[in-house]
Image (cartoon, rainbow, N blue to C red):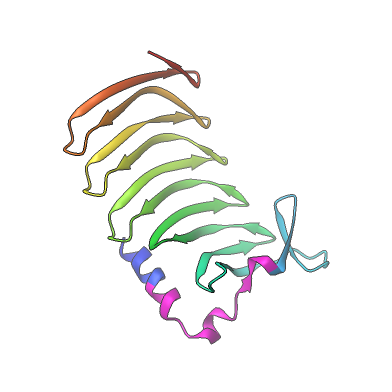
Amino acid sequence: MIKITFVFIFIIFAPESVLAKGISLSQLINKNGQYFISDKLIPYSGLTLSYFKNGTIKYVGNIENGMKHGVWLRYLNGSIWKENYLKGKLEGPWEWIRNNGKIWSSGTYKNNKKEGKEKHYYSNGQIYYEGQYSNGKQVGLWKYYDKVGKLVSEVFYGIGQEAK
């Protein structure tokens, strides 16, 4: 949480000369998941940013050898979505943090697909629902709770299909 807050504060208050070292994602050409500067055949490496129409930052992340790599942050209405890339594919933990600093949801990616435990929370911090993913599909028992934490339903998913 401290790292994310630091990065967020740094990006918001960083001098333009620091951010100027990055390049806007809109200035890069995406060819089959690899990013290039204009029509050069050399893949781009470095910081990249994307902006909303009002000029505020939408995404910030790193590209290595033309592929997204490392931590990427996405900003939306004061919330932060943090995800990790490895050679252009989503890999490792992700989390969505509300503008009040509380976690909205969290999970893990493996080879560009959701994998393992995923949890979603109400704004008061109580678990909304939780379950497992395998190879990008919901599997096993998923539990759903009310705003005070009382279990209200359970759904079992087998091989990506809902089965009650």
From the viewer's perspective, tell me whether residue 100 is left or right of residue 7.
left
How far from the left and from the top, in percent, is residue 58?
A: 52, 64
Q: Which residue appears at 67% of the width and 66% of the height?
A: 26
- 105 or 67: nearer the eye? 105
Residue 159 drawn above or below residue 133: above
Question: Per the image, is 12 magenta?
Answer: yes
Residue 84 drawn above or below residue 65: above
- 106 or 66: nearer the eye? 106
From the viewer's perspective, tell me whether residue 124 is left or right of residue 38.
left
Q: Which residue appears at 29% of the width and 29% of the height?
A: 144
Residue 50, located in which quarter of the rendered image?
A: bottom right
How far from the left and from the top, in percent, is residue 148?
A: 16, 38
Residue 54 drawn above or below residue 106: below
Q: Which residue appears at 82% of the width and 64% of the height?
A: 41
Secondary structure mostly seen in the magenta stretch? helix
From the viewer's perspective, tell me whether residue 157 is left or right of residue 1.
right
Tell me the quadrant of the picture where the C terminus can be found.
top left
Tell me the quadrant of the picture where the N terminus can be found.
bottom left
How far from the left and from the top, in percent, is residue 66?
A: 69, 60
Question: Per the image, is 151 magenta?
Answer: no
From the viewer's perspective, tell me whether residue 27 is left or right of residue 146.
right
Residue 130, located in which quarter of the rendered image?
A: top left
Please identify the residue farthest to the top as the structure is shown: 164
Please identify the residue farthest to the front as the structure is shown: 54
Query: How many numbered discs, if any?
Result: 0
Q: Which residue appears at 17% of the width and 30% of the height?
A: 150
Residue range of the region highlighted in magenta in the rendering = 9-26
How far from the left and from the top, in percent, is residue 105?
A: 36, 45
